[in-house]
């Protein structure tokens, strides 16, 4: 395999959890609700996946459990932010704290146990002899293919369907959407729960595919990088794919530079994704200083039906 | 049951979302919730109710996992408040929470979401330790002040690294301050596993022990150190500055209405920079008082998430300085209680779970008390 193929594979394998989380975040934030609980949701997804897979040995039940737990947590965020209209930032932070602590509590008994080969690989034998494609796409796992599919589905949904138009309307101007007869609260609940499921799936993917052992706090800030990715991607699923893979490469760069036998201590290499996140955000902020960021216009503003604007 | 809806019911200008669903069923409902316009702040008891409800909710999870929640809570409570040792330990944990909490609170006053106290704490701890590494033979009257100055400066710079992107590049401070946490913690790991590692430490990831001159003095025979005085001084200073100075008034104005403040000629950018400098500086000082007063060395995992707990400390106290003293004591107890459940095989990060739950109920409670129950017919 040449360097390019290796990079592409690294990007996909370590970028897929980020991609799932970013897609979930995009869906939630498109409806106008800030979601900062991604770190906690991912950890809860990962620990649920670990526990159910070790007990049932079935991928289907594992995913089902992850969906149920994430949707329940999403429901809590939805109740607080949509029905009670509390501060969305604090609700998200609470979710992160709760998820971090609760996942550590639940995962105590399974910490360090390996979970090999939970997600089957999809063998595409007809690609075997194609030079680059065969190496990259010939033996990807199932969840990675699901993530490709999700990018397309979400992109088409948001930009090409009337339901997506309603969603964008709610994110930009819930009062107008309400007058148009769209059920703002219902759609927001649906988006928060569906998005939370995707973020939980990101945690499950991280655990089942990327590093198949539960370790307390194993996401190591990936949830927050996913939150930043939403901004880089300007709330667009296809750009999210590119940005997630870019960070996937950065994420694995550390290992690779170490393998070459570099003198740089690994701690500095591990800082790369975090530093690059801030630098890219600064660059984007500077470049788009007089332009809209692409964020839904009512992001973070609680909607109260009778309120006049 | 079939009473006619009162005329004012449906057109009431402050029918809430909860009220909306009620309004559609007015025929059947005798009472409904609506936003109470006279309530500007929630009553004090809601804090207690929230904490109790959060404990109850977590008890359900603990019971579902097959443990006796009462036993777990008793263990936590006795560990934190049940003995004089427990209480001094709780006070020891109160100090960093108090300093970080004040730092976080001062930033929240103008809606700057500093969640980087953890990293600023680490930066302060590293800077204070740098003094002991590079100036090992200073007498205590020089070493301690130098460590204080260095740690405040380092924490402040770490805060500015968030404030500058926020003011000049429109970078969301939540993300940048959090990313900087990871950077600072990795830097801490680097120095304690690498260049500053104690050669005689049997591979323990920590720097050599500080000399007596580099340690903060303690009260009597306890572990409680003079960092408590930093904390109390900071509380008084915070209270005075925010209440009685022009600067405090300007912060209040920006917090209440940034647009109006801008039109009144207040330089918001400058305030953000200053506030983050102070915020980071306080967290940095907390880092110094922890290494110099408690651990007596810089070591791996020096903070059990003080920076994150500080967020709740500040929020629980509604940014009130004396409330922060109380809530940091409460959460100090929660952290010590978290350690004490380790003896029955539970992770200490269980206290994070309780903290998250408390925060959930607190924000929900804040909203719920803004509603009033009213007869609709």
Image (tube, rainbow, N blue to C red):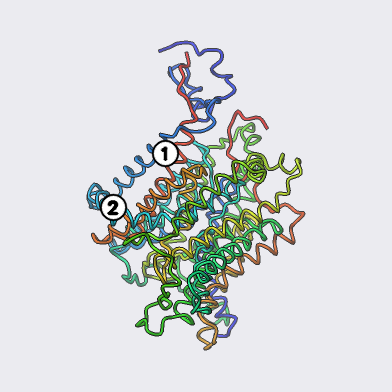
- Sooner in the amino-acid sequence: mark 2 or mark 1: 1
Which disc number belongs to residue B47? 1
Q: In which quarter of the image is residue B45?
A: top left
Above or below residue A67? Residue A141 is below
Which chain letter matches label 2? B
Q: How many labels does the image show?
A: 2
Rendered view: B262 above or below A276: above
Residue at image coords 57%, 48%: B108
Left or right of A209? Residue A286 is right
Mark 2 — residue?
B76
Letter of the chain that mark 1 sits on in the rendering: B
Relative horizontal placement of residue B212, taking residue B148 as reference (left or right): left
> In the rendering, at what x and y percent does residue A211 appear?
42, 71
- Residue B283 has which mark? none
In the rendered image, the residue lying farthest to the top is B3
Q: Residue at x 67, y 51 (%)?
A: B271
- Asked if marks 2 and 1 fall on the same chain, the answer is yes
Residue B148 location (% of width, % of height):
53, 65
Residue B313: x %, y % from top left = 46, 49
Task: Identify which residue, B285 or B196, lies in the foreground.
Answer: B285
Q: Quadrant of the N terminus of chain A?
A: bottom right
Is residue B252 or residue B54 the one in the foreground? B252
Nearer to me, A168 or B152: B152
Residue A13 visible, this orientation: no
User: CA gap, disc 2 to disc 1?
Assistant: 20 Å
Please indicate, yes or no, whether residue B1 appears anywhere in the rendered image.
Answer: yes
């Amino acid at each position: 395999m040449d360097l390019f193929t290796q990079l592409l594979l690294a990007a996909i394998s370590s970028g897929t959890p980020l991609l799932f989380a970013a897609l979930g975040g995009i869906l939630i934030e498109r409806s106008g609700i800030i979601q900062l609980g991604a770190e906690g949701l991912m950890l809860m997804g990962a620990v649920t996946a670990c526990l159910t897979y070790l007990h049932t040995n079935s991928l289907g039940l594992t995913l089902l459990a992850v969906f149920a737990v994430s949707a329940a947590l999403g429901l809590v965020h939805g109740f607080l932010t949509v029905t009670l209209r509390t501060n969305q930032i604090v609700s998200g932070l609470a979710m992160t704290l709760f998820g971090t602590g609760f996942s550590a509590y639940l995962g105590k008994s399974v910490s360090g146990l390996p979970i090999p080969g939970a997600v089957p690989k999809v063998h595409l034998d007809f690609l075997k002899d194609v030079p680059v494609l065969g190496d990259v796409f010939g033996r990807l796992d199932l969840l990675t293919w699901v993530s490709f599919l999700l990018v397309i589905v979400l992109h088409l949904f948001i930009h090409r369907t009337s339901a997506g138009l309603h969603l964008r309307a709610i994110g930009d101007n819930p009062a107008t959407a309400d007058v148009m007869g769209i059920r703002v609260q219902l759609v927001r609940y649906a988006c928060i729960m569906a998005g939370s499921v995707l973020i939980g799936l990101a945690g499950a993917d991280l655990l089942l595919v990327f590093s198949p052992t539960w370790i307390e706090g194993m996401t190591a800030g990936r949830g927050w990088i996913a939150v930043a990715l939403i901004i880089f991607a300007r709330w667009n699923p296809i750009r999210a794919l590119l940005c997630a893979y870019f960070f996937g490469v950065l994420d694995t760069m550390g290992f690779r530079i170490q393998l070459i036998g570099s003198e740089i201590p690994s701690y500095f290499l591990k800082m790369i994704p975090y530093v690059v996140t801030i630098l890219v955000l600064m660059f984007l902020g500077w470049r788009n200083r007089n332009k809209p960021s692409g964020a839904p216009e009512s992001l973070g503003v609680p909607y109260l039906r009778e309120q006049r604007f | 049951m079939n009473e006619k809806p009162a005329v004012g019911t449906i057109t009431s200008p402050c029918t809430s979302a909860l009220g909306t669903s009620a309004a559609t069923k007015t025929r059947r409902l005798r009472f409904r919730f609506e936003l109470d316009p006279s309530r500007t702040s929630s009553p004090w008891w809601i804090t207690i109710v929230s904490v109790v409800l959060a404990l109850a909710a977590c008890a359900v999870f603990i019971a579902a996992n097959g443990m006796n929640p009462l036993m777990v809570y008793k263990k936590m409570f006795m560990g934190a408040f049940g003995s004089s040792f427990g209480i001094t330990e709780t006070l020891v944990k109160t100090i960093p929470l108090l300093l970080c909490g004040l730092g976080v609170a001062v930033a929240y006053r103008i809606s700057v979401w500093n969640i980087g106290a953890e990293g600023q704490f680490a930066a302060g701890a590293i800077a204070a330790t740098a003094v002991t590494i590079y100036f090992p033979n200073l007498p205590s009257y020089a070493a301690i002040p130098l460590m204080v100055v260095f740690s405040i400066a380092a924490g402040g710079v770490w805060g500015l690294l968030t404030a500058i992107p926020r003011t000049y590049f429109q970078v969301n401070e939540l993300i940048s301050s959090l990313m900087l946490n990871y950077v600072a913690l990795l830097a801490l790991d680097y120095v304690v596993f690498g260049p500053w590692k104690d050669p005689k430490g049997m591979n323990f990831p920590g720097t050599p022990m500080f000399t007596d001159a580099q340690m903060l003095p303690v009260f009597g025979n306890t572990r409680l150190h003079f960092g408590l005085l930093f904390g109390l001084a900071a509380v008084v200073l915070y209270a005075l500055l925010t209440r009685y100075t022009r600067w405090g008034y300007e912060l209040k104005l920006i917090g209440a209405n940034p647009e109006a403040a801008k039109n009144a000629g207040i330089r918001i950018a400058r305030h953000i920079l200053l506030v983050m400098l102070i915020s980071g500086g306080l967290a940095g000082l907390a880092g110094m008082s922890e290494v110099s007063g408690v651990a007596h060395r810089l070591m791996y995992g020096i903070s059990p998430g003080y920076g994150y707990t500080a967020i709740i400390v500040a929020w629980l106290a509604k940014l009130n300085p004396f409330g922060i003293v109380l809530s940091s004591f409460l959460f100090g107890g929660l952290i010590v209680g978290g350690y004490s459940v380790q003896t029955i095989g539970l992770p200490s990060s269980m206290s994070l779970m309780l903290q998250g739950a408390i925060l959930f109920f607190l924000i929900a409670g804040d909203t719920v008390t803004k509603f009033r129950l009213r007869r609709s017919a």
